[in-house]
Structures are given as C-alpha cells and as structure tokens.
Amino acid sequence: MEAIKPKNILVHRYLAGIEKEKWSLAHDGGWRRGVMTTNMSECLNSVLKGARRLPISAILHLTLLRCVQYFIACVSTGGRMVQENQLWSDYACRKYDKWARKSTEHRVAKFDVREQSASVATVGRPSRGQHMQVVKLSTMDCSCGKWTIFGIQCSHVICTAKWYSLDPTTLVQPWYNISEYLATYEGRFQPLADERYWDPPTFELHHNPVRREKEELVEIEQLD
Ligand SMILES: [Zn+2]
C-alpha cells in the first residue's frame, strides 16, 4: 500500500477503504489460485467474445455454440493429456517443470524435522535476486507465497521435499489432477431442434416499453 501512495493518492484512498482480501491476491488466502482477473465474468468473456449487441435469440444461439466448441476443445485436450500420461493439467505441468528446474539452483538447510522446515537460499543470477525463503512442509507453507497462491509447490518446496526424502510431485493440490480436469468437462450438450418442434412455453412474455425507451435514450446520448 505504501508503494501505491506516491504513485496515485486517489487509488491509495480508494483501496484503503476496501478489505484487502477482496482485491489482493496476496491477502485472499489462496482462494483464487493465481487468477488475476477480478471475477468469473472475465473467464466467460474470453469464451463468449463477440456475443454482444445482438438480438437475444442470436446471443443465446451463439453462447450455446461457443460453449459446445469450448467443451469439445477441452475434452480433446484432456484426451491428449491422458495419452501422454500427464499427472496434472498443462497449466500445472508448465509451472511445476519451471520451478523444478529452478530448484536445482537452491541451497537447503534443514531446521526442524517435526515441522519439516528449512531455510532455502536462492543462488541465481544476481540480477534475478538472491533471497532466503522459509519452508514448512507440515503446514504447507513457503514464505514466498506461491504454494498458497497457486496450489503448486514452488522451487523452494520442491528442493526441501527432496531433502526430507518426500516425493515433491505428491504435494500438488488434487484439483490439478487429470481426473479432475476430465470431470470438469464431462457434461454433454444436446443439439437444439428448430423452434417449430419446441414444446409450447408454460409462461407468457410481456413487452416492457418503459425500459426499452430508456435504453434507446441512452444509446442516442452515447451516439451524440
Ligand atoms: Zn517458495
């Protein structure tokens, strides 16, 4: 917060009025697992881009088609990951491989066997920073915060686990498992028949002229 203050005092004031866990990845207790977008709507937007400013029926049709395409692509990706005998999703594999390579550059000093704690000195290039991190395997914690934020063990945890003769691959959170990925996309869609074949609706639609007039007024003002 102190770093934000000299950059923009208005932003600092605004953020000071909101609980940190509502907007900061570092303070949300790991709930968002590294997701930097503000909410789920951003995820939906990435899939449904373009399905806007169309008639309602066209939006619904496009939304259905995009969802079906997305699920088909994900099921195909899942099949490929199973064939390649991956333990986790591509996202987790990329992160784990990167941090496993980095872990070979660290020096570990064991501290408490019961807590399985250690201090880990990073011995990388000086330009990339040399730090000391504290790892406690018993409480699944590393002072760098990455294990909590991403649910994937950081380079410090990987080398500490090896020093305590633990298999570091067992410390990745289970929701990255291939089985979880496949379960996410196991839902199936049914093709939609022409409207003429639908059952008659059990409700009545009512036009809302007041709301439409307001919307048209806003559109005209925006054009001006
Ligand atoms: Zn760490």
Image (spheres, helix red, strand yellow):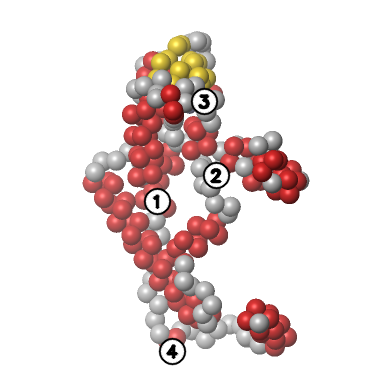
Residue 124 x/y as whole percent: 40, 24
Residue 193 x/y as whole percent: 39, 81
Q: Place residue 162 in its image quadrant.
A: top left
Which image quarter holds the C terminus? bottom right
Nearer to the camera, 208 or 47: 47
Helix, strand, or loop for circle 4?
A: helix
Asked if residue 173 shows in the view, the reply is yes
Q: Is mark 2 within 8 Å of ligand 1?
A: no
* Residue occupied by mark 2: 32
Helix, strand, or loop for circle 2?
A: loop
**Above-or-below relation of 86 to 130:** below
* Residue occupied by mark 1: 183
Q: Is mark 3 within 8 Å of ligand 1?
A: yes
Q: Place residue 98 in its image quadrant.
A: top left
- The amino acid type of the residue labelled 4 equals Arg
* Residue occupied by mark 4: 196
Q: Which of the two labelled residues, at mark 2 and mark 4, occupies the earlier sequence position?
A: 2
Helix, strand, or loop for circle 1?
A: helix
Camera-near label (2 vs 4) is 2
Q: Which of the two labelled residues, at mark 2 and mark 1, occupies the earlier sequence position?
A: 2
Label 4 and label 1: CA atoms lie apart by 34 Å
- The amino acid type of the residue labelled 3 equals Cys
- The amino acid type of the residue labelled 1 equals Ala
* Residue occupied by mark 3: 142
At a point 26% along the width and 41% down the height, the residue shown is 85
Q: Is mark 1 within 8 Å of ligand 1?
A: no
At a point 37% along the width and 74% down the height, the residue shown is 191
Label 4 Cα crowd, 10 Å radius (few <14 / some 14-19 / many 20+): few
Q: Are marks 3 and 1 in contact (CB under 8 Å)?
A: no
Camera-near label (3 vs 1) is 3
